[in-house]
Image (cartoon, grey):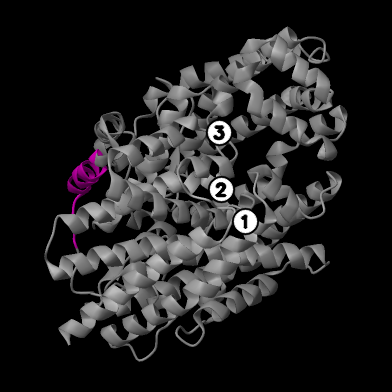
């Protein structure tokens, strides 16, 4: 028996208030299509500068402005198509629109590739003269100097244009993964304690069943989920192998020592900072998380702590169930500490349909925030009917607040900081929500529940994503040494990383070894480990905000407004944290240990 798509609600039957309003981008699809064609037609507004950027500071400035304006328009076009598809991957029209955007993106990128190639080719002294001659170029200074640093890895103009033209092909592995995951995969339904049949999807498994208080539901869902994953593992492994080989080929073409050097160069992060995150957290967090697993096993009365139980609620009979509306109000109140401007943005986001929280057939799993420059951010999530969803909502609104403020205070060129910092503003909001909930209740059971939600955030960023990062580190090393990347290799490496971290506290079975199929982050460069970097920063800065109030808030808001005008190490230092050393990471891990200490004490008191 298989789960049919009509077991879940179709997109067209979702109430409007549970969906986002994309008419804020384009009133109609016809308007979107008109602008898509207009952007392609207006490419000569930028390409007319080809071959002229080294001639004068004025030519350089005018070209950068023209390029920025065109990309701002195309960004809205691209966002509209991709956001439409993200809520229903089964819609063939939306699939075609995304394909058209991908094709247009390749054309745009190829046509504009000359800009960065010519800037890289401008002699250093000439660039310094340009920056002195044309005051308006100061707004582009970091962008220009960052490009100048890429001289050792730049290719010829014709080669750069060719690589840019292949952009849509380079994104094919991710697209294949997403299409298979969201459009093709069907899962056997499961049954609960009353033998009631329940539908299962990627979104339902990740957002609901994997953390169900029912051991039967968790384990049945785990079995059904992995049964289907196992059927796709060879296809997904080939897609991921193609992604990795493409990255390695590019790193060699650009004369980097390794693919890791290339991907860290994009983030402006040193190898030491990268390895600190992976090594310190795995080494120092592992003993705490093993204690946590043992506590769960003991309290829940499990004979075995299986991987299916790893997200089981520690207090399965207690859940703060809530509606989206109630949770949104709680999040809004919790974030008032961030000041009036930030709070007003949150209120607008929650009342003007910036958030899509329905569950429907074909909807993308997980949660994300997209922030098109020149418009407002959009948040996607699937509401789980519990207060845990409030932490997800706060997280994504953290991204929204970050790029809303950066977009209001910076040019498009300067809005995005290094990916290394990206998860700090989002997890900051989770930290503040947790503090708010703890400060507004004296009920021991509720307080324990809130601590468990905080641990859920650390589990997601310091465990799930750091172990994804560990798998990436292993994969890049193996492939660069000539090891073919197959499903069995990926599963073996994942199982080994999990076993090293969890020891004997959790049983690592075949299903656990398939967790490399769960997330799309592997197709996004060295993204997974950055979650832990962001949470390290927010752990420390949130405490500053709680202890110091307005002065710390103002400092943080200034960091958000800075956008991408600073390198990550300097940006984070502006917030009061030094990530060049492992001290901050150790401090954040120690905080997790204290949360687990408090839980253990709580259960001792009960006994």
Q: Is residue 333 magenta?
A: yes
Image quarter of residue 289: bottom left
* 405 relative to 279 in the view: left or right: left
Q: Earlier in the sequence, mark 2 or mark 3?
A: 2
Q: Earlier in the sequence, mark 3 or mark 1?
A: 1
Q: Residues within 10 Å of mark 3 (few under 14, many from 20)?
A: many
Residue 273 has which mark?
Answer: 1
Q: Is residue 492 magenta?
A: no
Q: Nearer the viewer, residue 99 or 116?
A: 116
Disc 3, SS: loop
Residue hosting label 2: 420
Q: Earlier in the sequence, mark 2 or mark 1?
A: 1
Q: Residues within 10 Å of mark 2 (few under 14, many from 20)?
A: many
Look at the image and tell me in which quarter the C terminus lies.
bottom left
Vertical position of residue 151 compared to residue 480: above or below: above
* Alpha carbon separation for disc pair 3 and 1: 19 Å
C-beta proximity under 8 Å, tags 2 and 3: no
Choose mark 3 or mark 1, whichever is in front. 1
Q: Nearer the viewer, residue 26 or 493?
A: 493
C-beta proximity under 8 Å, tags 2 and 1: yes
Residue at 66% in and 28% down: 143
Residue at 33% in and 82% down: 295
Q: Residues within 10 Å of mark 1 (few under 14, many from 20)?
A: some
Disc 1, SS: helix
Give the residues drawn in magenta, as a range: 320-336
């Amino acid at each position: 028996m298989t789960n049919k798509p009509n077991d879940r609600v179709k997109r067209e039957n979702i109430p409007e208030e549970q969906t986002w309003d994309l008419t804020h981008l384009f009133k109609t699809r016809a308007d979107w299509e008109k602008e898509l064609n207009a952007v392609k037609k207006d490419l000569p507004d930028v390409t007319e500068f080809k071959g002229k950027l080294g001639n004068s500071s004025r030519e350089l400035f005018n070209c950068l402005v023209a390029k920025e304006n065109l990309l701002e328009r195309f960004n809205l076009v691209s966002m509209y198509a991709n956001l439409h598809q993200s809520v229903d991957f089964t819609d063939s029209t939306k699939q075609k629109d995304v394909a058209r955007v991908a094709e247009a993106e390749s054309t745009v990128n190829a046509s504009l590739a000359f800009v960065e190639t010519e800037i890289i080719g401008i002699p250093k002294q000439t660039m310094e003269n340009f920056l002195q001659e044309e005051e308006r170029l100061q707004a582009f200074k970091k962008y220009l100097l960052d490009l100048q640093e890429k001289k050792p890895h730049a290719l010829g103009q014709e080669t750069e244009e060719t690589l840019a033209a292949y952009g849509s092909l380079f994104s094919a592995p991710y697209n294949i993964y997403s299409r298979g995951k969201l459009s093709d995969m069907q899962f056997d339904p499961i049954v609960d304690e009353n033998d009631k049949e329940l539908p299962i999807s990627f979104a339902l498994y990740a957002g609901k069943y994997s953390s169900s208080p029912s051991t039967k539901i968790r384990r049945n869902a785990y079995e059904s989920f992995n049964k289907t994953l196992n059927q796709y593992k060879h296809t997904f492994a080939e897609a991921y192998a193609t992604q990795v080989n493409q990255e390695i080929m590019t790193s060699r073409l650009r004369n980097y020592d390794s693919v890791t050097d290339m991907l860290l160069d994009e983030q402006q992060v040193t190898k030491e900072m990268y390895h600190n995150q992976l090594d310190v957290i795995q080494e120092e967090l592992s003993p705490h998380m093993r204690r946590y697993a043992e506590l769960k096993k003991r309290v829940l009365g499990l004979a075995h702590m299986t991987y299916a139980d790893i997200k089981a609620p520690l207090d399965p009979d207690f859940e703060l169930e809530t509606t989206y509306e109630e949770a949104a109000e709680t999040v809004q109140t919790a974030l008032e500490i961030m000041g009036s401007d930030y709070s007003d943005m949150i209120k607008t986001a929650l009342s003007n349909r910036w958030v899509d929280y329905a569950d429907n057939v074909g909807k993308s799993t997980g949660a994300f925030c997209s922030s098109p420059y020149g418009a407002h951010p959009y948040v996607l999530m699937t509401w789980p009917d519990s207060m845990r969803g409030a932490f997800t909502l706060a997280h994504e609104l953290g991204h929204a607040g970050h790029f809303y403020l950066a977009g209001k205070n910076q040019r498009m060129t300067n809005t995005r900081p290094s990916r290394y910092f990206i998860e700090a503003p989002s997890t900051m909001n989770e930290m503040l929500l947790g503090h708010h909930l703890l400060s507004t209740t004296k009920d021991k059971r509720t307080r324990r529940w809130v601590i468990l939600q905080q641990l859920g955030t650390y589990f997601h960023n310091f465990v799930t994503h750091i172990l994804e990062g560990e798998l990436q580190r292993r994969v890049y090393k193996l492939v660069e040494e000539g090891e073919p990347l197959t499903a069995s290799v990926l599963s073996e490496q994942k199982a080994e990383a999990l076993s090293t971290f969890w020891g004997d506290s959790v049983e690592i079975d075949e299903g656990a070894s398939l967790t490399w199929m769960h997330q799309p982050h592997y197709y996004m460069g060295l993204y997974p480990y950055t979650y832990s970097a962001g949470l390290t920063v927010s752990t420390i800065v949130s405490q500053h905000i709680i202890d110091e109030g307005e002065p710390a808030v103002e400092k943080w808001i200034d960091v958000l407004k800075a956008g991408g005008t600073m390198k990550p190490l300097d940006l984070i230092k502006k917030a009061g944290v030094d990530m060049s050393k492992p001290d901050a990471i150790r401090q954040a891990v120690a905080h997790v240990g204290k949360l687990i200490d408090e839980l253990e004490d709580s259960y001792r008191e009960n006994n």
